[in-house]
Amino acid sequence: MLADLASALTPLPEAATLLGVPEPVLRMAVEDEGDAAHAAYHNSKQQVLLDIRRAEIRMARAGSPLAMQLVKEYVNQMEAAE
């Protein structure tokens, strides 16, 4: 369920409410790299963000000025992280 919420880009406070757990408990689990919640949350979130970037790249290739600008920002972020 947490992975599904993360893939919908649900903020942690909302996810905690939907899961019926206190937000601090969920936050601690998500931050703990040894907890299964960490992998479920972060992997799902990163996958949907990757899907969004890929869609924006397709739109940029099709000529969308806004998508071109976003893709340029992604390239800058990528190069800064290298």
Image (spheres, helix red, strand yellow):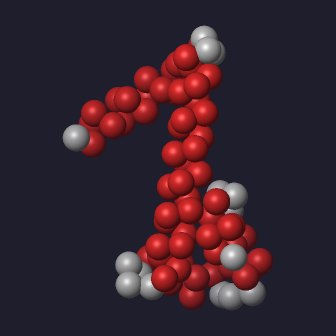
Q: What x and y, as percent, mark residue 39?
A: 47, 73
Image position of 20 (left or right of 37): right
Position of the N terminus, as image quadrant, is bottom right
Q: Residue at x 41, y 81 (%)?
A: 32
* Residue at the outermost left position: 82
Q: Is residue 11 visible?
A: no
Picture mark count: 0
Q: Is residue 58 above or below residue 41?
A: above
Residue beneath the point at 69% across and 67% down? 5
User: Percent position (x, y) of residue 60?
Assistant: 56, 19
Which is nearer the eye, 33 or 61? Answer: 61
- Quadrant of the rendered image containing residue 56: top right
Q: Nearer the viewer, residue 6 or 12?
A: 6
Query: In the picture, residue 7 is in which quadrant?
Result: bottom right
- Residue name at image x 63 percent, y 81 percent: 23
Left/right placement of residue 4 relative to residue 46 reads: right
Q: Is residue 71 visible?
A: yes
Question: In which quadrant of the rendered view does residue 31 lie?
Answer: bottom left
Picture layout, residue 82 above or below residue 43: above
Quadrant where the C terminus lies? top left
Residue at 49 percent of width and 64 percent of height: 43
Residue 58 coordinates in the image, percent (x, y): 58, 25
Q: Nearer the viewer, residue 62 or 32?
A: 62
